[in-house]
Image: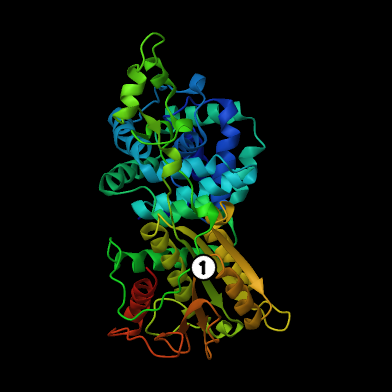
Amino acid sequence: MTTLEFQNVDEVRRYVLQGLWLGRVTRPEAARVGPLLAWLMELAAAGEPLPPPGFVADLGQIAFGIDPSAAAKEHPVLPNWPTALGRNYEDHVLGKVYADWTFERAADALRRYEGKDRARGLAFVVKQFRERAGVGGVDLSPAIVRTMLSTKPDDLLSEGYESFTRDGPHPFLVRQYEELISAVRRMAEVLAPEDVIALEQRTAIADMTRFVAHRQILTLTAEIESKLPSRPVRPLVGRKEVPTRVLDEDQYPVGGYTSISNRGSVESLLHSQLAFMEKDESPDLFDMKFVRDELFYYSRDENQFLRRRRAFAFVLTADLIAARFKDAELPAQRIMLASATILALVRKLSEWLSTDALHFELLFVGDEGKQPLAEEAELFRILLRERIANKTAAVEVVESLAAVGTHCSHLSRKAQVQILQLTADVPMAEPDGTVLTALVIDTARPRLLDGIGRAVPLEAEDAAEAWGRVVRKVLELWV
């Protein structure tokens, strides 16, 4: 990865203006110079090395959608520019971008952005692409790009083409395209899954603190999930379960017009069976088929589909503010590992119990009217945005543990309730009609307790492994 900083302003200007001509997705036109310079401005303002401007233009045009009338059918012939280099760039780099699933999802997310957020989102994509590929760039001042924005686009294009004729291609541009082609041939995906989620949940354009926290949780969650089996775990011996009533809304008929039986009531008779009635014969064919049970009936009302209602409550007490601490033997703060544990449980439970009616609740307990874990609550509203939108999850702030107990007891009237309390102190009493599990986070190595305070063995060699074992043990208690 090579990053240069030109001392001569003319060299920087030549690098950028020649790059305006090197986009291969659309033709170089004055109408597209302004948006491209705005994208370059966002990269420069963020202090990121600038990759070839033509490459940035191509990524932007693909991400935001190409106007069919502007698609480049023939590329301009640039003096002294290596023809083979352009073909290799199209085949390997653009071919990779078009076929990559991570870039496709990222582009779908970017198209939902508006205004300046679009430039910021694209700058994030370019940055992550460049870092994953190991490609450098040019450090330049935003003032240089700002000067170009005040110049007529036609003049910029003319100056760039003349520099090709007069001075030849910029050596660093040629070198960067060669490095880019070589790097892309070694890449797996263009973006990491965490990058795609950051774009979809808009933390990619949030402040750095929220972005880093969001990224850490996703990375830790992926690491925890990689150590879990793909199939549901075997239930733990001696675990507690509380049976619940089956509500009417959990019973509904299945089948319909494709569900047919030879037994049923007259009201469910297929209308086509009336064709067997004969005027002159008695008994007729209809009577014969009725006696032989050969008539067909709809059996919709005879089938009932039953599913369990299950609610999972994650209770985070105010004393967890002490978990914003990084132990030497852990990869991140305790509160980040606790958040990753919750997210991993939500994902695995949704996957393994997909036939049940699931509802997840994150209850953040306040402290005398204060909300010490407000940042964590807001972060989970982002992480669980889709589930909150379809009403299968909720993030709430409650006043006290007593209010948590009342809420969970009320919830147990219509669902099987499992509670995981995350605390740095003594666990709460088990609410009526629920099953409580406590995760005590007072040291680097967490402790898992059941509803009566008995320790659940984790069997881990170190603190980092213990966090992964917590998720597996909780799943054995709940699934």
> Residue 470's x, y, as percent?
37, 78
Q: Is residue 407 above or below residue 273?
A: below
Locate residue 167 relative to residue 429 in the image: left or right. left
Residue at the disc numbered 1: 213
Q: Is residue 145 above or below residue 316?
A: above
Which image quadrant: the C terminus? bottom left
Q: Amino acid at mark 1?
A: Ala
> Residue 123's x, y, as percent?
52, 48
Q: How is the image coloured?
A: rainbow
Which image quadrant: the N terminus? bottom left
Count of numbered tags:
1
> Residue 222's x, y, as percent?
37, 63
Name the residue nearer the viewer: 116 or 315. 315
Quarter of the image where one finds residue 372: bottom right
Locate residue 441 relative to residue 223 in the image: left or right. right
Q: Secondary structure at mark 1?
A: helix
Local crowd size for mark 1, using a 10 Å CA cut-off: few (<14), some (14–19), many (≥20): some
Name the residue nearer the viewer: 466 or 217. 466
* x 60%, y 62%: residue: 207
> Residue 104's x, y, as percent?
42, 40
Find the residue positioned furthest to the top: 280
Q: Is residue 388 above or below residue 283?
A: below
Find the residue positioned furthest to the front: 282
Q: Is residue 357 visible?
A: yes
Name the residue nearer the viewer: 272 or 43. 272
Name the residue nearer the viewer: 273 or 9. 273
Q: Is residue 365 visible?
A: no
* x 40%, y 85%: residue: 328
